[in-house]
Amino acid sequence: MNILVVEDDFISRRLLCRYLEKSGNCDVAINGNEAVAAVHEALDSGNHYDLICLDIMMPGMSGQEALTAIRQLEGERGIHVGQGARVIMTTALEDHVNVRQAFKASADGYVVKPIEKQKLFKLLNELGLTMTVDG
């Protein structure tokens, strides 16, 4: 499985990678611009991401903006909603406006920080990305 963790906070980025590293190749991006570039490169190489964990609050391009750009890139390549990467928004924002905006932009899930491994893996399993929680 190809995984992209997009997070501007080093500790959060490292934690997510540790949670997910046994499930596949885990790339990182520190902002929305890097995320969109990584997805563009992956799509061009034919090695698309299966999972993207995307923080909402980042400097420059926000996670919401990056999600819209990622879905646009997929659409340009004929990848319809539900066929592309599973995108989980990872954020400290739990308000209804951000949740609705994320799902309107075709996010597949929403996890509030601090991220608990069991909750993350339960959501991933519900999305068809079968993973087991170690420890």
Image (tube, rainbow, N blue to C red):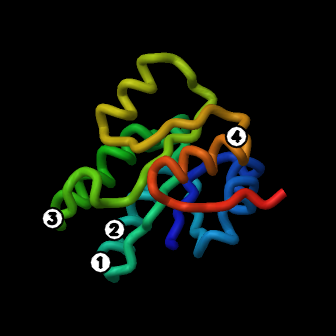
Q: Are marks 3 and 1 in contact (CB under 8 Å)?
A: no
Type of amino acid at the residue the image marks with label 3:
Gly
Q: Amino acid at mark 4?
A: Ile
Which amino acid, mark 1? Asp
Marks 1 and 4 sit apart, C-alpha to C-alpha, by: 31 Å
Q: In the rendered structure, which disc, 3 or 1, sits on the residue that comes first in sequence?
A: 1
Amino acid at dot 2: His
* Residue that carries the numbered disc 3 in the rendered image: 78
Q: Identify residue for label 4.
A: 115
Give the Cα distance between marks 3 and 2: 14 Å
CA distance separating discs 4 and 2: 27 Å
Question: At which x and y percent is residue 102?
Answer: 39, 33
Residue bearing the label numbered 1: 44
Task: Look at mark 2 in the image and give the residue it sits on.
Answer: 40
Q: Earlier in the sequence, mark 1 or mark 4?
A: 1
**Residue mark closest to the camera, 3 vs 1:** 3
Instruction: Please report contact status of discs 4 and 2: CB closer than 8 Å, yes or no.
Output: no
Find numbered disc 2 in the image and state the secondary structure of the residue it sits on: helix
Indicate the position of residue 28 as horizontal and vertical percent values.
59, 63
Q: Is residue 69 left or right of residue 96?
A: left
Sequence-wise first label, 3 or 2: 2
Residues 110 and 70: in front is 110
Seen at 44% across and 50% down, the residue is 87
Along the horizontal axis of the image, is 120 left or right of 88? right
Q: Answer yes or no: do the residues labelled 1 and 4 have beta carbons within 8 Å?
A: no
Tag 3 near tag 2, CB within 8 Å: no
Residue reaching furthest to the bottom = 45
